[in-house]
């Protein structure tokens, strides 16, 4: 991923240095197990741990000749650690190292992403409670529907990211497996107890049954969850973009003193961060399909998945980390305009109270169909003539005979729409 959309911690996880370090950890752990089982001489793991050094440049030099990354890695370690390093990788296949290490990188990345989500949850909780009773219009199909509160909108995002956290925890668990089972996964040339030892040492679980690889449905699940989280990021970003439109202007991204919105128009303050998040979300979601297609490999393995994972492994995790971090900061610094929210609530001159008018007529004995038709007629006139709905309703003798003036006045108030906000907040923020 390009540095513009990358943060150091995730870049380090997906660096070649870290990848080869994990490979070495896997090989040393396997050697320790084999020593305990008296498969290889004692002292191999100790020497390799002491003298083995990661030299990325040297590994590449060797790989250019042998055209095999794991062999190049093992050769470079042997050059530093000496003759005893020849006992590394006994009975193992390349995928034992590659897949176990890849899973460790996913677990490492997932732990950072969980911390990112925690930051978003913290900000959303704080903001939701602050604006719990700040009225704003609820929209369906982009059209004014009925009053809600801005805090309720944020609480909805909070609950969604709670689910995302749970999904990610499950996805991390899904890929927390280790395979040290040899060619085609039969343990023909390696003791199964080596896998058990390595798994415990690296805080993983033995893969119950591997082929030559760890089954890719596990990874597809992980990347699918990243795609879902990206979708949630875009949902929040899209809402901010809509609410910052000049015609709405209920929200605004923080705009610093020296910031400029347009090279041509000095007045512009654009929602660039939320637009950027929308784009980043598309990138992460685009990686879900190739992850799903990696599930169906030939027989006990092929390497068609390898090139895919070399790309989507770092790119998905690094991009999502950056997007989550940006979203947390965006939400923390968002500017809210309650007065504009109130102004927009009154924009349609009482049309947003049409449902309760209709329901009140049904309570007085009218059929729902007749009550709907009466209120819809007045609503159309209110909209077309730009007249307050209350004024039209008061001139209707039938409605006046069914609904008292006091009741009518109560219908045209926002307060009743807020009566269950505390109930909803208790369910969300327990």
Image: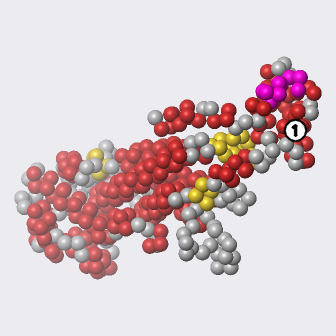
- Is 405 covered by the magenta stretch? yes
Q: Secondary structure at mark 1?
A: helix
- Front-most of residues 205 and 380: 380
- The structure residue drawn at horizontal position 19% and vertical position 49%, both measured from the top left corner, is 197
How many numbered discs? 1
The residue that appears at 84% across and 19% down in the rendered structure is 365
Q: Residue at x 47, y 72 (%)?
A: 4
On-image quarter of the N terminus: bottom left
> Which residue carries the number 1 mark?
391
Q: Does the rendering let one see residue 64? A: yes
* Residue at the extreme top: 365
Residue at the image position 89 percent from the left and 37 percent from the top: 392
Q: Judge whether residue 364 is colored magenta.
A: no
Query: Is 382 placed above or below 11 here?
Result: above
Q: Main secondary structure of the magenta part?
A: helix
349 or 68: nearer the viewer: 349
Which residue is nearer to you in this view: 315 or 262?
Answer: 262
- On the image, the x and y values in percent for residue 160 come to 52, 45
Boundaries of the magenta span: 400-408
Query: Residue pushed farthest front?
Result: 406
Question: Horizontally, is 45 left or right of 57 in the view?
Answer: left
Colouring scheme, one of rainbow, by chain, secondary structure, one colour: secondary structure
Q: Residue 236: percent from the left, percent from the top?
A: 57, 53
Find residue 40 and report its horizontal and vertical position in percent: 10, 58
Where is residue 336, by image quadrant?
bottom right
Position in image of residue 7 (x %, y %): 41, 67
- Tell which of 75 and 400 is nearer to you: 400
Tell me if 209 is positioned left or right of 4 in this view. left
């Amino acid at each position: 991923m390009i540095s513009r959309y990358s943060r150091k911690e995730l870049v380090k996880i997906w660096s070649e240095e870290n990848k080869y370090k994990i490979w070495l950890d896997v090989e040393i752990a396997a050697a320790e197990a084999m020593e305990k089982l008296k498969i290889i001489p004692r002292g191999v793991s100790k020497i390799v741990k002491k003298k083995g050094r990661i030299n990325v440049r040297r590994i590449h030099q060797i790989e250019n000749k042998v055209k095999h990354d794991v062999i190049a890695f093992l050769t470079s370690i042997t050059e530093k650690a000496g003759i005893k390093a020849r006992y590394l990788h006994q009975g193992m296949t390349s995928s034992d190292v590659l897949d176990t290490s890849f899973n460790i990188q996913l677990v490492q990345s997932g732990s950072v992403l969980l911390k990112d989500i925690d930051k978003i949850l913290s900000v959303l909780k704080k903001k939701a409670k602050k604006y719990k009773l700040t009225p704003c219009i609820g929209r369906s199909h982009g059209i004014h529907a009925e009053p809600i509160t801005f805090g309720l909108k944020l609480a909805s995002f909070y609950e969604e990211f709670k689910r995302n956290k749970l999904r990610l925890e499950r996805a991390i668990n899904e890929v927390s497996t280790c395979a040290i089972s040899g060619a085609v996964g039969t343990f023909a040339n390696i003791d199964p107890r080596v896998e058990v030892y390595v798994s415990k040492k690296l805080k993983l679980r033995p893969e119950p049954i591997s082929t030559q690889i760890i089954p890719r449905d596990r990874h597809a699940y992980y990347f699918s969850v990243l795609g879902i989280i990206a979708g949630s990021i875009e949902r929040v970003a899209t809402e901010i973009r809509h609410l910052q439109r000049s015609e709405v202007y209920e929200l605004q991204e923080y705009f610093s003193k020296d910031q400029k919105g347009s090279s041509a128009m000095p007045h512009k303050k654009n929602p660039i961060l939320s637009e950027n998040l929308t784009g980043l979300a598309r990138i992460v979601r685009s990686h879900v399909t190739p992850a799903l297609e990696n599930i169906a490999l030939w027989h006990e393995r092929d390497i068609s998945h390898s090139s895919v994972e070399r790309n989507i492994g770092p790119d998905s995790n690094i991009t999502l980390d950056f997007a989550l971090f940006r979203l947390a900061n965006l939400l923390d610094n968002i500017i809210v305009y309650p007065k504009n929210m109130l102004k927009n609530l009154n924009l349609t001159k009482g049309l947003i109270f049409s449902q309760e008018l209709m329901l009140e007529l049904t309570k007085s004995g009218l059929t729902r169909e007749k009550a709907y038709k009466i209120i819809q007629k007045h609503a159309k006139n209110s909209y077309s003539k730009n007249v307050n709905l209350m004024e039209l309703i008061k001139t209707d003798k039938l409605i006046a005979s069914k609904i008292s003036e006091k009741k009518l006045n109560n219908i045209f108030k926002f307060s009743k729409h807020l009566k269950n906000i505390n109930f909803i907040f208790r369910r969300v923020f327990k």
